[in-house]
Image (cartoon, rainbow, N blue to C red):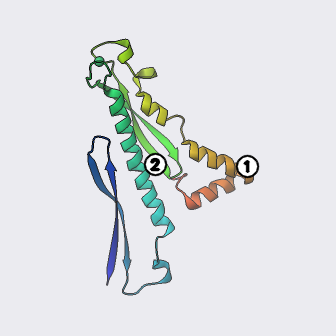
Amino acid sequence: MAVTEWAIYIETRRPDGSRERCEIGAIRRDLSAPVPDDLGLRLAEAKDLLQQLQLRMIDGQIDQSAALDRRCCHCDLTRPLHDRRQRVIQTLFGMVPVRQPRLRTCPCRRPEADSSGSGGRSRRVSMLLKGRATPELVGIQTELGARLSFREAARVTDLFLQVASAPIT
Ligand SMILES: [Zn+2]
């Protein structure tokens, strides 16, 4: 056996200078007895990597956006978190579960300090989570739907992407 492993990492670099690195997957090949299919990345591996990247990227975007809205622009306090609502967003790279935060009013009670949308939702997060699917996914489904039957369009997207898969965990 001569197994080589390629570990794939993502590194988050935040505006405050902090960094976080995590492994999102690894690809292994036994090079002692290779077959043609061993060359390069396989579609299933690429799908898995894209799903993991999507999950971590969206998770980070929600957290960072909510953190910006929690900071009161008048008294600089961090507004309390009321709760988080579970949602699922359809993306080109899989269905992603998200926890949408709802914020409490700042203790300073200045009305202009409340940057929440309806129901105390973070405005920035609400902007990101408009609708049940990302605009890019909707655009591709619309484009394919104009050329193919619904069934065929679903088959094509499922072949190359993870759109129809169960939520990523
Ligand atoms: Zn305040």
Q: Position of residue 104 (x, y in %)?
A: 33, 21
How far apart, in angstroms, are the residues tagged by discs 1 and 2? 27 Å
Quick one: which residue is furthest to the bottom in this view?
33
Q: Nearer the viewer, residue 13 or 119?
A: 13
Give how far across and how far down residue 110 sits, in percent.
Answer: 33, 12
Determine which of the numbered discs, if any, sits on residue 115 in the image. none
In front of the other: 159 or 16? 16
> Vertically, is 93 above or below 97?
below
Reading the image, the residue beneath label 1 is 146
Q: Earlier in the sequence, mark 1 or mark 2?
A: 1
Which of 99 and 105 lies nearest the eye of the viewer? Answer: 105
Q: Secondary structure at mark 1?
A: helix
Label 1 Cα neighbours within 10 Å, binned few <14 / some 14-19 / many ≥20:
few
Task: Inspect the image, locate mark 1, and give the three-letter code of the amino acid beneath it.
Answer: Ala
Which type of secondary structure does the marked residue at label 2 adopt? loop
Q: Quadrant of residue 45?
A: bottom left
> Which residue is rendered at x = 31% and y = 12% of the image?
109
The residue sitting at 27% across, 15% down in the picture is: 107
Percent across and percent down for residue 89 are 49, 42
**How busy is the neighbourhood of tag 2: few (under 14 within 10 Å), some, or many (20 plus)?**
some
**162 lies left or right of 22:** right
Residue where numbered disc 2 is placed? 167
